Amino acid sequence: MTARGELSAIFVTYKMKDALLERVAQFKSQFPDSQVIVADNSPATYKKYAQLDTKLQRFSDTIYVNNGINSRFAAYNIACKNIKNELVVFRTDDDRFDESVLRAQLDNNPIDDFAVTPHYFNNDYQIPISWERPIEGVIFTHTFLSTLLPFADQPGADWALLKTAFAKSNPRFLNQPVLFKAAHGRDH
C-alpha cells in the first residue's frame, strides 16, 4: 500500500503554454517535491515561440519531453518512461484541478493499485462506478500502471487502459472531486 508519498504527474500539452504553466504551478504548490513530466505535442513553430522547455526550468524536478507528433497517447507512453515516483497522475492543460483535495485524500487514504475520484464535468457532479471516467481523476501506483502500459495509439486508449485496470484490480473509491473537466476540452 502506498500513502501520501510524492507523485509523478504527467501533463500533455498542445499550444497552451500559459494554461500549462498555470496547471504545473498549481500542482507544485501542493506537491513541491513531486516530479512533473510535460510532453509537448505542439507544432515546431509554436514550440519555438513558446519556449516551454525553458519556462519549465523554474520548477524543480521537471522533465520536458519534445513529442514530434500530436498524439496524446504516444505522449503518455513517452512520458511514462520517465516516471520515478510510486504514485502517478495524469493532467491536462485545459481542465481545472483542486490539488489541495488530492493532497488531503492521499494523506488519509493508502493506495494499493489505483484509486478513483468523482469529478465535475461541465459543472455537473459525477460519480462513475466503472472504468468509464476521465483518466485525470485516477491515481495509479507506478507498479500497477506499468502492468497496463503501453497506451494504444488510437481513440479511446485511455478508457481501454482503465477497462483493463478495473478488470485486474478493484480501485479505492475516494470521495472528493479533484477534476473539474471542461466540456469538449478546449473552450476555443
Image (tube, grey):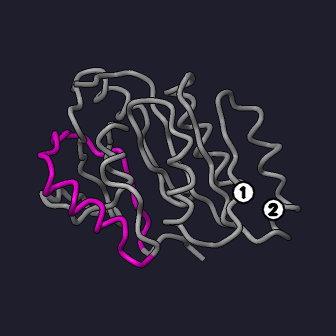
> In this figure, what is the number of numbered marks?
2
Q: Amino acid at mark 2?
A: Lys
Residue 43 percent across, percent down from the top left: 76, 71
User: Residue placed at 28% from the left, 24% from the top?
Assistant: 2
Residue 51 vs residue 6: left or right? Answer: right
**Where 16 sits versus 156, above or below?**
above
User: Residue placed at 34% from the left, 22% from the top?
Assistant: 4
Disc number lying in front (2 or 1): 1
**Where 133 sits versus 22, above or below?**
below
Q: Amino acid at mark 1?
A: Asn
Q: Quadrant of the N terminus?
A: top left
Residues drawn in magenta? 154-183
Residue tagged by mark 1?
66
Residue 8 percent across, percent down from the top left: 49, 36
Q: Secondary structure at mark 2?
A: helix
Residue 175 lies in the magenta-colored region: yes
Considering depth in this image, is 178 or 88 the residue closer to the camera? 88
Q: Secondary structure at mark 1?
A: strand
Marked residue nearer the N-terminal end (2 or 1): 2
Residue tagged by mark 2?
47
Mark 2 packing: few (<14 Cα in 10 Å), some, or many (20+)?
some
Contact check, label 2 and label 1, Cβ < 8 Å: yes
